């Protein structure tokens, strides 16, 4: 049974005498060293060792016999073995001393470490590769952090410059608006005086040109007002001042005012729905919104047309609508309609800044309102502003 166990053991087992000659070797050890038993038995065990262990092995045994101090006996250590083809392989060697039949025999138990060493080397390679990747990633992250820091500084500088430019722009717009108003007022007054003094001449050409002057002054004044309003909105200087007022009275006042600037035979028809007329909004902002919408309806509608202006107050909502049957808004332009400085491509030579609807939207938002519209080319446009009633 003992012989069967030794011959079928997974690990190699070799026995030597006290002079280092091999007495037995099991099949597992033969397979490891690529030797036949008759090649090994009777020869010195050093034949299975590569230098320098081969030259030193006999000295190991002699020293043990002289001093009785074991170095590897009773313990284990990693050593290298030598195969027939000259290749080396690592194995763990455990040596035991056996006293048998009046003499000493040394038994060596050999466990092949080739796979473990290969796995260990592979793990080391993976670890080294991982360290390299981590180092590269760290360098990349450090570079990214430096770039982000640099970008942050550039953005901060850009924001500071933009802030300065914004302040400069605001001061310029404010100054320009006020500076232009004075000569425009003088031109408007002079045109009115010319119109009055020319009454006696009964000259239609004079009247025609005076009308052109007044119209141009009105257009320039409107442009200045739009720019000034936009500048105040951008600077955060506009706030809604909520107060209770009569919506119907304000709407009738607006209708009367805008009817005076309407085109020939253009009629603004105002209608209110509901028994309640009091609302709590900002009357100045609301008036500006409605004036802008009706002004656009007048501008983009022809003569001999109707402009429908209506208000409605329900328990939850205040709704204001302005509808015309003018040139309409092309479908491709509708998504950009409320953007600043945008104008539809079908307006031709009709003057304007493209700021009006943007300002209306922002005024409505300040009063917690929303603006919507429906439009089709050559059939007109309907604008609706809705305000919640708290």
Image (cartoon, grey):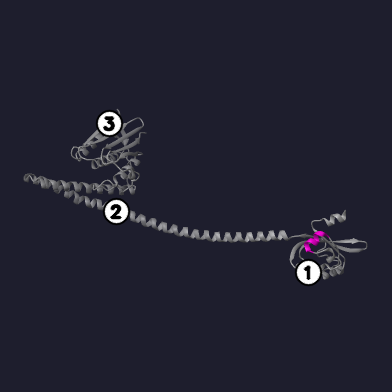
Q: Write down the residue under mark 2.
A: 171
Q: Position of residue 166 (x, y in %)?
A: 33, 54
**First in residue order: circle 3 vs circle 1:** 1
Q: CA distance from mark 3 to mark 2?
A: 42 Å
- Mainly helix, strand or loop, the magenta region? helix
Residue 272's tag is 3
Residue nearest the observer in this picture, 133 or 29: 29
Q: Nearer the viewer, mark 2 or mark 1?
A: 1
**First in residue order: circle 3 vs circle 2:** 2
Q: CA distance from mark 3 to mark 1?
A: 113 Å
x 84%, y 63%: residue: 37
Question: Does the stretch in magenta take in 185?
Answer: no
The crowd level at tag 2 (other Cα within 10 Å; few <14, some 14-19, many 20+) is few
Residue 53's tag is 1
Q: Which residues are magenta?
A: 26-34
Q: Nearer the viewer, mark 3 or mark 1?
A: 1
Q: Position of residue 175 (x, y in %)?
A: 26, 53
Seen as rendered, the residue at the extreme top is 275
x 74%, y 66%: residue: 88
The crowd level at tag 1 (other Cα within 10 Å; few <14, some 14-19, many 20+) is some
From what the image shows, is residue 331 above or below residue 74?
above
């Amino acid at each position: 049974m003992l012989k069967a166990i030794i011959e079928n053991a997974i690990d190699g087992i070799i026995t030597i005498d006290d002079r280092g000659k091999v007495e037995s070797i099991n099949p597992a050890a033969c397979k490891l060293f690529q030797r036949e038993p008759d090649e090994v038995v009777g020869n010195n065990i050093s034949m299975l060792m590569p230098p320098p262990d081969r030259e030193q092995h006999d000295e190991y045994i002699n020293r043990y016999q002289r001093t009785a101090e074991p170095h590897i006996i009773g313990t284990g250590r990693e050593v290298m073995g030598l195969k027939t083809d000259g290749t080396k392989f690592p194995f763990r060697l455990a040596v035991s001393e056996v006293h048998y039949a009046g003499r000493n025999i040394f038994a060596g138990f050999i466990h092949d470490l080739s796979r473990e060493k290969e796995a260990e080397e592979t793990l080391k390679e993976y670890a080294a590769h991982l360290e390299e990747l981590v180092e590269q990633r760290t360098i990349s992250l450090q570079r990214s952090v430096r770039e982000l820091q640099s970008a942050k500084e550039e953005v901060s500088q850009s924001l500071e410059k933009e802030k300065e430019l914004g302040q400069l722009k605001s001061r310029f717009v404010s100054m320009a608006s006020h500076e232009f108003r004075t000569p425009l007022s003088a031109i408007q007054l002079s045109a009115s005086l010319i119109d009055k003094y020319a009454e006696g001449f009964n000259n239609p050409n004079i009247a025609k040109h005076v009308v052109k002057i007044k119209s141009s002054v009105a257009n320039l004044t409107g442009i200045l007002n739009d720019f000034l309003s936009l500048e105040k909105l951008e600077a955060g200087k506009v706030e809604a001042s909520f107060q209770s007022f009569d919506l119907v009275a304000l709407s009738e006042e607006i209708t009367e005012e805008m009817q005076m600037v309407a085109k020939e035979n253009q009629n603004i028809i105002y209608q209110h729905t509901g028994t309640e007329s009091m609302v709590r909004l900002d009357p100045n902002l609301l008036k500006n919104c409605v004036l802008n919408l009706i002004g656009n309806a007048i501008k983009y509608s022809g003569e001999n047309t109707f402009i429908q202006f209506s208000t409605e107050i329900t328990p939850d909502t205040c709704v204001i609508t302005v509808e015309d049957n003018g040139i309409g808004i092309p479908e491709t332009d509708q998504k950009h309609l409320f953007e600043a400085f945008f104008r539809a491509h079908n307006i031709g030579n009709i003057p304007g800044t493209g700021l009006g609807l943007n300002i209306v939207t922002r005024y409505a938002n300040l009063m917690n309102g929303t603006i919507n519209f429906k439009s089709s080319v050559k059939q007109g446009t309907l604008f609706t502003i809705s305000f919640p009633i708290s």
